[in-house]
Amino acid sequence: MTGRQKIYVAAAVLTVLAAICAFVAGRYYVDNKKTNFTEKYVLYVYPDMTADQVLDSLQANAGVIRPKSLKRCFDKIEVASEMKPGRYVVDDSCTGIYVARMLAFGWQTPQKLTLSGTMRSKGRIAQKIAAQMMVDSSAVGAALNDAAFLSEYGFTPENVFAMILPDTYEMYWTASVKEIFDRLKKEYDAFWTEERLAKAKAQKMTPMQVSIMASIVSGETLKAFEYPVIAGVYLNRYRKGMKLQADPTIAFCYDYTLDRILKKHLKVDSPYNTYMHIGLPPAPINVPPKACLDAVLNPENHKYIYFCASPAFDGTHRFAVTYSEHLKNARAFQRELTARRRAKAAAAK
């Protein structure tokens, strides 16, 4: 081979090597440095999902720009065998290699668990949690009824409503039932500051008793501005040694199945029947909002003993100091109720 031929061969080899290097460098850049998605997508990876199913989900929802590059990244990081269940957020800043590593190493984005609205049964609580987390509702329900499990937190199946504070919590979607309850107990302990404990003591109540009273207040009205007023009413009755005569406790006795509470319902044989028994019922009858707890700790100072629904039918109440005044308010409500029923019947003809 002549010198010139050797030069040609060397140049050809260098050209091929340069092309290979460029190809490898290009792939590296595309896989590691260049975004491969156009849409923000919250990807939920369940324990029984495969890497191919995840790839399909990403391609269908995250706007994958280069599917082959993403598949290559999955193979490189061995996502098929290393993928961890979880909640992952993919957006237009993510590279293929980052998403592959995210799945393989379990780099989850926290999930917001929101507990709000009316929570009057353990089944409802379990459904709310299971709808937002990976846990099954039956597992949460079992925990809410497990005396040994709840004893670790200082609660029982009967009074566990007090442990749950309506709020929004951030935690990993894959959190276990125990981890969820650990967080709920942590937030419960954080709520009961020295200041709140001192206010409960000033009311001559324990935190549990405050929760019980707050659950009654919560059952009486949806108007938050009325919480301190109604709390004051029940505290006035409580201090006087009167029966609380709280309709929400009767509704609880019937598992909230009654459309209306009638006189016959007030005779139900239950320790939760505050028409029969003096003092507080044994445990909360629902999960009260924090505002109800604070209303019991900071009640409006007044002399009201009675209250009834307002004839305005706007969800508010009228309050009274004397029974005669209360009867006057009750008659006004009844007259308006009767008038509305007659008007409705006439309109139906």
Image (cartoon, rainbow, N blue to C red):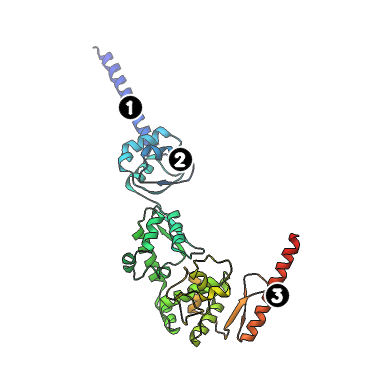
Secondary structure at numbered mark 2: loop
The residue carrying pointer 1 sits among few (fewer than 14), some (14 to 19) or many (20 or more) residues within 10 Å by Cα, namely few
Disc assigned to residue 90: none
State the residue position of label 2. 37
Q: Determine the CA span between mark 1 and mark 2.
A: 27 Å
Q: Position of residue 33 (x, y in %)?
A: 39, 40
Q: Residue at x 36, y 58 (%)?
A: 177
Do callouts 1 and 3 mark residues in contact (Cβ within 8 Å)? no
The secondary element bearing badge 3 is classed as: helix
- Which residue lies under the disc numbered 1? 20
Work out whether residue 33 can be spotted. no
Give amino acid for label 2: Phe
Where residue 269 sits: x, y (%)? 47, 75
In the image, residue 133 lies at what x, y percent? 41, 54
- Residue at image mark 3: 335
Q: Residues within 10 Å of mark 3 (few under 14, many from 20)?
A: few
Q: Nearer the viewer, mark 2 or mark 3?
A: 3
Q: Earlier in the sequence, mark 1 or mark 2?
A: 1
Looking at this view, is 104 or 34 the one in front? 104
